[in-house]
Amino acid sequence: MTEPSDRPQLLRRLGARDASLIVMGGIIGSGIFVNPSRVARMVHTGPLVMLAWSLGGAIALIGAGIFAELAARRPNDGGVYAYLRDAFHPAVAFCYGWTLLLISQGGGAAASAVTFAFYLPAITGIQLSHPVATAIAVGVIGLFTLVNCLGVRQGTNAQNTFMIAKLIAIAGVVAIGLFAVGSALAHPLSNAPAPPFNPVVAMGLALVPVMFAYSGWQTSSFMSAELREPHKTLARGMIYGVLGVVVLYLAVNLVCLIALGQDGLARTDTPASDVVRAVLGPIGGRIMATIVALSTLGFITNQILTAPRVYYQMAADGTFFKALARIDPRTHVPVIAIAVQGVAAMLIALSGKYDLILNWVTSIDYIFFGFAALALVVFRRRDALIGAPKPFFTMPLHPWSTITFLLVAWAIVLDVLVKSTSATLIGFVVLLTGIPVYYAFRRKAERTL
């Protein structure tokens, strides 16, 4: 089901630069400021820390390449939702959109907003009670929901502004860390004997927080209907955006190891803050708090900008609430879908369940990443049968690279399931509730025909 052509439509106002910044904005949250320590505790040596982040970057680049070819072959409205719908079944696609609303995007935006509120005292020096912090988090979500309702250009400009600020801030952290080289603050990479451990098992465990930090490149595909030449701009944005993040992440981990040493990195929960504080003194803590706050704001804008386009497409297909498919005639954006995403994030923030929901994000995301890899195999075969022209971008070393990503994605799901069985199973239950909900909407749509 599609909207009649005389109704307001989404407008193609975004280019390759926007696509790249949206890709980076969907990836870089607060994880890179915390996860280096978690990885260091698991793998015990500096070289293995860098290897873990390099492997994670390679996997992310393979994933970006797969999604780049999907975008080139199927520049459909809805991105990943459309790939899953067309390759498999609309019910699979609906479950993806269902978990976006209730888990991935809603929970991610809520957690980022609460993180921002809890960092305010370190910036302002004013202590906030828990209710006040929660109210600020809800207010921030509401503000960015309103900004995105004003138009795709306004929402994208907000996302891009915070993304550029994040890039400058992270580059500053790297520069400060390099300043520590050769000073009394610098520590050599630890070569002290580590407790016995299995490096293969340790690397597998370390890849979970690494891949969590790298996840999020798929959100840019939701903007297909508003990108100029999406078969080109989205493909370029995926590759350039993920490549830029890999370079940044490796640089951050390197300077953390140089400035703190392997042992110091493993002992702290705030590695980036420790690096900045070591060089700049007490003011470094406030600077780092500001950087993390900027990062969380940028992540919120990305979540509210991108995901509503999926709910819009679900409604346009007749498998979700009709109102979500309405486009505002003045702003040409799905205002109701954007509002629904904002309200969902606010409710999760108020509930205090955002930390629990984030435990489900990695497993749910990588289930569908694996299906996206399978979708590429399906589309390649279909296109070969009909003699379709070669797309703008093709994944190198396919099918081996695609199969490798599929296996890694589902291995991560299995690893998370083993480590956090009860939380992961709850996430699976939420996912599976999407099936009866889909068929309920499907039956309703059939009765109205």
Image (tube, rainbow, N blue to C red):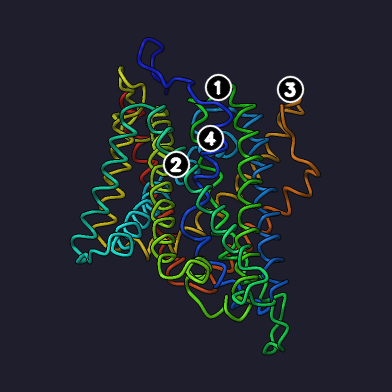
**Residue 222 % position (x, y):** 49, 35
Q: Which amino acid lies under the numbered mark 4 shown in the image of this protein?
A: Gly
Give the foreground label among 2 and 4: 4
Label 4, secondary structure: give it: loop
User: Which percent across, then down, holds residue 387?
Assistant: 77, 22
Question: Which residue bears the numbered disc 3?
Answer: 388
Quadrant where the C terminus sits is top left
Which three-letter amino acid code belongs to the residue tagged 3? Ala
Q: How far apart are marks 1 and 3 (CA)?
A: 22 Å
Total label count?
A: 4
Classify residue 354 as left or right of residue 205. Answer: left
User: Which residue is at 41% across, 51% downward?
Assistant: 294
* Residue 284 sits above or below residue 25 on the image: below
Residue wearing tag 4: 79
Asked whether disc 3 touches disc 4, contact meaning CB atoms under 8 Å apart, the reply is no
Residue that sits furthest to the top in the current view: 6
Pointer 1 and pointer 3: residues touching (CB < 8 Å)?
no
Q: Distance between the residues labelled 3 and 4?
A: 20 Å
- Look at label 1 and name its amino acid: Arg
Label disc, if present, on residue 228 of the rendered structure:
1
Q: Residue at x 60, y 32 (%)?
A: 234
